Amino acid sequence: MEEASEWIIAGVFYVEDGRIWKRGRDEPLAEREQVRNRCEYGDARVDLWYDGKRKSLFVSQIVWIANTGQSIPPNFEIHHRDEDYTNNEFINLLCVHALDHAKLHREAE
């Protein structure tokens, strides 16, 4: 993810109107849904292609990186505060350690 973070921080990929764009493209990148374990819903994911390399990230990860200008630290994940995985507004996203993320979801159940 580090390399993809560098691309986002450098502005190769950016967020506009809730969609992910690549500099110089006329349309946003295609999103696909990735269903999570033990859930009937999924998160939107985008493939980032740059310099002959492909990285796949959740839209929430891209939004968080683009807004903070930082990479997501190892063993950290992006949590949706309102538990709505379609709401990728930056204010709804929280970067938390994977163990704390699991606790947050257990508490919500």
Image (tube, rainbow, N blue to C red):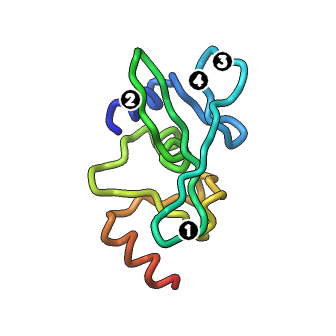
Image point (64%, 34%), residue name: 30
Q: Earlier in the sequence, mark 4 or mark 2?
A: 2
Q: Mark 3 — residue?
A: 25
Distance, label 4 to label 3, CA atoms, is 6 Å
Q: Secondary structure at mark 1?
A: loop
Q: Mark 4 — residue?
A: 22
Q: Is residue 10 above or below residue 43?
A: above
Asked if labels 1 and 3 touch by Cβ distance under 8 angstroms, the answer is no
Q: Amino acid at mark 2?
A: Glu
The crowd level at tag 1 (other Cα within 10 Å; few <14, some 14-19, many 20+) is some
The crowd level at tag 4 (other Cα within 10 Å; few <14, some 14-19, many 20+) is some
- Comparing labels 3 and 2, the label whose residue is closer to the camera: 3
The crowd level at tag 3 (other Cα within 10 Å; few <14, some 14-19, many 20+) is few
Q: Mark 2 — residue?
A: 6
Distance, label 4 to label 1, CA atoms, is 27 Å
Q: Secondary structure at mark 4?
A: strand
Q: Earlier in the sequence, mark 4 or mark 1?
A: 4
